[in-house]
């Protein structure tokens, strides 16, 4: 039998005559339980928030976006089409027209972007699933639009307001003197749908057909501002973008969803890491109670240590007794905390009791990676805390 482990278990699970030590041990155990519970729930919450946020990006952004390296527009050629159609990694692609415009409705004005899309655009993103009112664009109808909920609130827009259309206004291109009475292209559209999404997204776009966008901007038949792609395997987006960039050359810029939302991804990952560090610090503070409990136990058991030393136990073996005791205390507290945390996580997943808004439960996700992160973090910190506490034991201390 492992001698230090046997003694450590006796010390840990047997009450001492000193009530203060019993209380400190209970407090130390409770601190580890709460620390493990909090760290696991926070990591699970951020996992859920990350998945939820990435799902929101599935509505607003494609897996891959191709735009011209210089200027706003390019001409879609047979060569480009051949590159895309022959690529087996592409599930579907769609050409788009984007331009900044001026919106006017009932004496209210707003600056936004139009996005002219083809009939298959809903196969690129999940934009149709984000509709909260009305319908998506109908290929049989012209001069209709789907606007973001943010734009709708700013302009007090509803859907199917046939009495008052939304005016989309864009300055005419050109240089030199421009007649102010004839300086803009204008199109009136009826709103057939409202979509919701991230704050930036629902305040940015008015979706219309590419035919209407081309008509408004006076573009030629093959003139577009971008091509958006849906991949068969989105996890290969980075490798795919590098290969496609080589094929298309410097004329075009190929970007992944992550590159299109670089700041967003950095913020999410940074918040996750900072939260992990903060709650790890809380766990470290909780482990000071473990150090205190072990030191008090060492002082209380000093006469026992002298007996063990007298019958042949070495100083290192005696140190290992208290290292094992602190380690067991930490591991047991950690397992209880993880067990309670798992129950709470699954409770939130299935009931959605904790809500961000009245109709939106806080997103949370159980991941084994979070489970093992907490186990590794607390196991290492618990071992170090036990090592620090047992370092006070020496030959002089035992014989004194």
Image (spheres, rainbow, N blue to C red):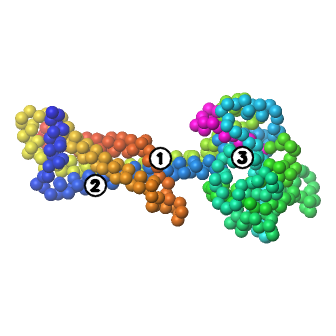
Q: Which mark is residue 273?
A: 1
Residue 23 falls left or right of residue 263: left
Residue occupying image coordinates x 60% and y 38%:
234
* Mark 1 vs 2, N-terminal side: 2
**Dots 1 and 3: beta carbons under 8 Å?**
no
Residue occupying image coordinates x 68% and y 45%:
123
- Find disc 3 in the rendering and name its residue: 121
Magenta-highlighted residues: 225-240
Q: Residue 8: name its quadrant.
A: top left
Image quadrant where one finds the C terminus: top left
Residue 118 falls left or right of residue 271: right
Residue 233 part of the magenta segment: yes
Q: Could you say where residue 356 lies in the image, as x and y percent from the top left?
A: 51, 61
Q: Could you say where residue 366 lies in the image, as x and y percent from the top left?
A: 44, 47
**Dots 3 and 2: beta carbons under 8 Å?**
no
Of tags 1 and 3, the one toward the viewer is 3
- Find disc 2 in the rendering and name its residue: 30
Q: Residue 73: name its quadrant.
A: top right
């Amino acid at each position: 039998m492992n001698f230090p482990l046997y003694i450590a278990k006796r010390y840990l699970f047997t009450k001492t005559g000193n009530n203060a030590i019993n209380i400190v041990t209970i407090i130390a155990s409770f601190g580890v339980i709460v620390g493990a519970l909090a760290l696991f729930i926070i990591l699970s919450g951020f996992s859920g928030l990350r998945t939820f946020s990435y799902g929101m990006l599935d509505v607003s952004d494609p897996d891959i976006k191709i735009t011209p390296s210089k200027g706003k527009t390019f001409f879609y050629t047979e060569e480009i089409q051949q590159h895309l159609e022959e690529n087996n990694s592409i599930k579907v692609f769609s050409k788009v027209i984007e331009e900044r415009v001026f919106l006017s409705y009932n004496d209210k004005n707003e600056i936004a972007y139009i996005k002219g899309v083809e009939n298959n655009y809903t196969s690129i993103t999940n934009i149709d699933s984000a509709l909260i009112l009305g319908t998506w664009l109908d290929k049989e109808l012209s001069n209709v639009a789907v606007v973001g909920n943010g734009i709708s609130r700013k302009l007090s827009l509803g859907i199917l307001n046939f009495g008052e259309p939304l005016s989309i206004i864009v300055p005419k291109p050109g240089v030199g003197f421009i007649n102010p009475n004839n300086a803009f292209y204008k199109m009136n559209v009826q709103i057939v749908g409202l979509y919701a999404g991230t704050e930036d997204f629902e305040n940015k776009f008015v979706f219309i057909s590419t035919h209407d966008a081309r008509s408004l901007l006076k573009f030629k038949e093959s003139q577009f501002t971008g091509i958006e792609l849906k991949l068969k395997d989105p996890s290969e987006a980075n490798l795919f973008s590098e290969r496609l960039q080589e094929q298309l050359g410097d004329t075009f810029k190929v970007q992944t969803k992550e590159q299109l939302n670089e700041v967003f991804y950095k913020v999410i990952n940074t918040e996750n890491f900072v939260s992990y560090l903060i709650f790890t610090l809380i766990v470290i503070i909780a482990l000071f109670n473990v150090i205190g409990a072990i030191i008090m136990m060492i002082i209380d058991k000093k006469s026992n240590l002298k007996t063990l030393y007298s019958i042949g136990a070495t100083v290192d073996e005696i140190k290992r007794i208290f290292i094992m005791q602190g380690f067991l205390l930490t591991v047991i507290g950690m397992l209880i905390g993880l067990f309670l945390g798992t129950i709470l996580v699954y409770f939130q997943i299935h009931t959605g009791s904790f809500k961000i808004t009245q109709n939106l439960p806080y997103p949370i996700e159980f991941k084994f990676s979070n489970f093992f992160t907490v186990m590794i973090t607390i196991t290492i910190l618990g071992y170090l805390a036990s090592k620090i506490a047992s370092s006070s034991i020496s030959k002089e201390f035992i014989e004194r």
